[in-house]
Image: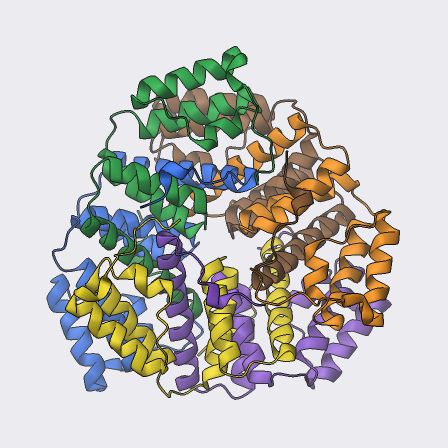
Chain colours: A orange, B brown, C blue, D green, E yellow, F purple
Amino acid sequence: MATIRQPAAPEDNPRVKAVFDDIRATRKTDFINNLWRTLAFDPALLERTWIDVKALMATPTELDPLTKEMIYIAVSIANACSYCVHSHTAAARAKGMSDAQHAELLAIVALAARTNHLVTGLQVPVDRAFEAG
Amino acid sequence: MATIRQPAAPEDNPRVKAVFDDIRATRKTDFINNLWRTLAFDPALLERTWIDVKALMATPTELDPLTKEMIYIAVSIANACSYCVHSHTAAARAKGMSDAQHAELLAIVALAARTNHLVTGLQVPVDRAFEAG
Amino acid sequence: MATIRQPAAPEDNPRVKAVFDDIRATRKTDFINNLWRTLAFDPALLERTWIDVKALMATPTELDPLTKEMIYIAVSIANACSYCVHSHTAAARAKGMSDAQHAELLAIVALAARTNHLVTGLQVPVDRAFEAG
Amino acid sequence: MATIRQPAAPEDNPRVKAVFDDIRATRKTDFINNLWRTLAFDPALLERTWIDVKALMATPTELDPLTKEMIYIAVSIANACSYCVHSHTAAARAKGMSDAQHAELLAIVALAARTNHLVTGLQVPVDRAFEAG
Amino acid sequence: MATIRQPAAPEDNPRVKAVFDDIRATRKTDFINNLWRTLAFDPALLERTWIDVKALMATPTELDPLTKEMIYIAVSIANACSYCVHSHTAAARAKGMSDAQHAELLAIVALAARTNHLVTGLQVPVDRAFEAG
Amino acid sequence: MATIRQPAAPEDNPRVKAVFDDIRATRKTDFINNLWRTLAFDPALLERTWIDVKALMATPTELDPLTKEMIYIAVSIANACSYCVHSHTAAARAKGMSDAQHAELLAIVALAARTNHLVTGLQVPVDRAFEAG
């Protein structure tokens, strides 16, 4: 169904193999999901994408791992990316997201969408108090 | 600039006054921002919107207050709602969001948008492993 | 603020003048709004756009004029087009939209956005009953 | 395919059963579509969503039922919610939408999207005449 | 899966047949893809859509054919139109798009989405230098 | 108006100065636009963003510079990023985009948006012929 045919033996390419090895080591799993298998058609694009996903999502940073996944899900919903909603919901689950947290995440996303559309329909002017500096 | 003229004396309407009083009491401030002042043109819409925003965003729930604001900002960015980005960034700041947390929030939103578009361009099929149940 | 400088004397071009004359005659007003003044930089694009807007929005068709404007506003909100929300809200007002109808339109748009995001977050599968044929 | 497994026997939960009973009574059908079956994983979210959908879409209000469904479809298309387009098109059909009305709805949505993008590309400034008050 | 049942024998309608004949002649192929087969339910909508697609995409104009397809793909990705991404990627391939060009197109779309979201999150004010005229 | 106050003397930070120096050298101009001045609040985010923008947009690659800017504009329009539309239209002009090319770019973006919405409203199933491999 993809617009690119997944390479049949992607790891024959050493650059692809290096990225796949790093994904397996970083995530401590043998599972390589379809995004990476599809990106293997262009090793440079695969490398750049993985480096940045790893740096932000698979490395300790300012925000905790579950919060980061929930923000990722929120954006993916608003951008209507079905695959991304699936993959990052699975990731959030793996990082401990409970049913109650999932329900609340969805409720906030839905509330934000509702007031986003209300505000855009009303064309509410920005309050001076909200302007930085 | 709004598509609705803000009522000049919104609190002459007792339903509007009741909502505004509740906003002031809940937020512990005299400041009523333009969203509510504009919604005052229709007291029923004002009431419904405030009740739901209050229940989720101004009441202790499953997720902590700052996480909720960051999710709200993420959706507002993806939906290109300028007012909402302003108002919820101000709210997140008031709840303690640091510059470093703000920068990381924006970096995650930008990364999600990037892979959302990449995935949609590739039309990556959903892995069976991501399907619930 | 536009990305194109509005031609200073657009009606010096006879193709532009013909479109502007038709806008004035069709709408029974001397007012030519900025969309058309800006599109005047490319007479062919101006002509094609006006012909199609006129055929659907300024000609009696299947749906009544106010319903058509409300559908137009709904799409413009979801696409975050500030100018379009302004211009079509003004058009809907001119065609008789009351404050109560405006409030309900916004409430439906906001409700739809809310369930759109909820459904996308849940990735609800389409019921067989909803499939045409 | 959903990100949440539908509860196998959702009506064992009395809060879910109450909502499902109300859906059946309100819509005069035994059919409960997948949105509600999926939302059953969180009874509070199910209740809040149904209460608001019922109040606006299944109760006589300012706008007529078919107009409301068409506005809902318009937003759902612009937000790229496949499930929502399916379910509300089915609802509009059930409320009498003809092929000709459906075609015109789609034509207006498409026209609005076209001018939305044109206007955003041109960054047309809002005419003073469009500002409320 | 469509919201409209494709007419079983669309070319029994002479207006549909004329459009299909023109598609076959213009594209030098017997293949009529599902968009046109579905639009056949409303001959007027079919005609208007084809005339405009043909004029811009199947006729020599200012920009070269492959550039036009790549712009079309970029918009279709950002609007999350799965069918459109598929059909225009196939068209771009038919017009010579290589794997390397495809990868770069996707990389630019992803980069634009990333800075679009960053800029909207920051609410960067437009530089005077960018204003036309 | 931004959600972040631009640092008053950003180049006091050597990491910011290094990026700004590279922007000036790469673009052969003293002008640093507001995106970079605002991103200066977080040197790491500034660096990562500039490195990737430079690699794709300010370095010879597969596609020619003007085509890349037009693709960037197309995405920015669809994502409703006003600043991005302004800045990349200015960049495209600087790289030689004529009025006629600009008009055609906008016409294609508008046509794509139109068929995107039409297809999503119809929920057209993907033709087998469009599937890669």
Residue E75 appears in the picture as rendered = no
When asked about the image quadrant of residue F59, the answer is: bottom right
Q: In this view, does A66 lie above or below B57?
A: below
In the image, is A33 to the left or to the right of D81? right
Of residue B128 and residue F36, the one placed in the foreground of this image is B128
In the image, is B110 to the left or to the right of E22? right
Find the residue positioned furthest to the top.
D14
When asked about the image quadrant of residue E83, the answer is: bottom left
Of residue D78 and residue D86, the one placed in the foreground of this image is D86
Residue F81 screen position, x and y as percent:
52, 61
Count the labels in the image.
0
Q: Is residue B65 above or below residue B119?
A: above
Q: In this view, does A132 lie above or below C35?
A: above
When asked about the image quadrant of residue F56, the answer is: bottom right
Residue C73 screen position, x and y as percent:
32, 50
Find the residue positioned furthest to the right.
A25
Q: Which residue is drawn at 50% across and 49% down?
A: B81
Residue F94 screen position, x and y as percent:
55, 85
Q: In which quarter of the image is the N terminus of chain C?
A: bottom left
Residue D3 screen position, x and y as percent:
60, 38
In the image, is D12 to the left or to the right of C67? right
Q: Residue at x 61, y 50 (%)?
A: A83
Q: Which residue is drawn at 57% across and 64% down?
A: B121
Of residue C51 and residue A82, the one placed in the foreground of this image is A82
Residue A108 appears in the picture as rendered = yes
In the image, is C69 to the left or to the right of A52? left
Q: Which residue is drawn at 55% across and 23% down?
A: B55
